[in-house]
Image (spheres, rainbow, N blue to C red):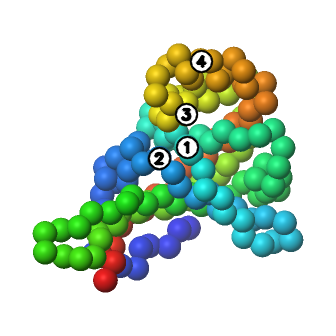
Amino acid sequence: MFREMRRRGQAISLEECVFLLKTEKRGALAMTGDNGYPYAIPLNFYFDESENKIYFHCAREGHKLDAIKNDGRVCFTLWNSGERHAGDWAYHVKSVVVMGRARLVDDEAVIYEKTKAIGLKYYPDAGSVDEELRRAISRVALIELAIEHITGKTVHEK
């Protein structure tokens, strides 16, 4: 159903893909937007390895939610900042591309749990996360991305 990676020699392992999903801070979620135009937006996220799902929080209305309600097929892409090898001016960058189905979560307990997990990834301490959740959880929507296909690769940018 999904294409094989053309440059298989640049592929990284599933374990490396999972590591990047667990450690990188931002990626871009792409979906079909208004009038069939592509719509991609940078987002913070949380990868739940045990569920093989990615979670995003957002407002309870907007373009992203409308697009997902119309067509849940999405692509999520992330990349690291890269590294230079000794004596080389160009970066070696790793990226991950995830294909899957996104849906809006309606279970309030799951919304709280996963939004807290997102917060713990980004905030300096659990107290700050708890305070933010007390203040804003009533305005939060949660998107769940069930992963169907994942690939990753390293590119030498020269």
The mark total stands at: 4
Gap between marks 2 and 3 measured at Cα: 10 Å
Mark 4 or mark 3: name the one nearer the start of the chain: 3
- Toward the bottom, the furthest residue is 158
Q: Which residue is rendered at x = 30% and y = 58% of the image? A: 13
- Judged left or right of residue 55, residue 79 is left
Q: Which residue is rendered at x = 41% and y = 42% of the image? A: 22
Amino acid tagged 1:
Phe
Residue 45 disc label: 1
Residue 17: x percent and y percent? 37, 53
Mark 2 or mark 3: name the one nearer the start of the chain: 2
Q: Which residue is rendered at x = 53% and y = 55% of the image? A: 27
Residue 92: x percent and y percent? 29, 69
Q: Secondary structure at mark 4?
A: helix
Q: Nearer the viewer, mark 4 or mark 3?
A: 4
Q: Are marks 2 and 3 in contact (CB under 8 Å)?
A: no
Amino acid tagged 3:
Ile
**Mark 3 lies on residue:** 118
**Mark 4 lies on residue:** 130
Residue 25 disc label: 2
101 to 153, vertically: above or below: above
Residue 51: x percent and y percent? 50, 35
Gap between marks 4 and 1 measured at Cα: 18 Å
Residue 30 disc label: none
Label 4 crowding class (10 Å Cα cut-off): few <14, some 14-19, many 20+?
some
Gap between marks 3 and 1 measured at Cα: 6 Å
Gap between marks 4 and 3 measured at Cα: 12 Å
Rendering quarter of residue 8: bottom left
Q: Nearer the viewer, mark 2 or mark 1?
A: 2
Rendering quarter of residue 36: bottom right
- Judged left or right of residue 45, residue 74 is right
- Judged left or right of residue 56, residue 61 is right
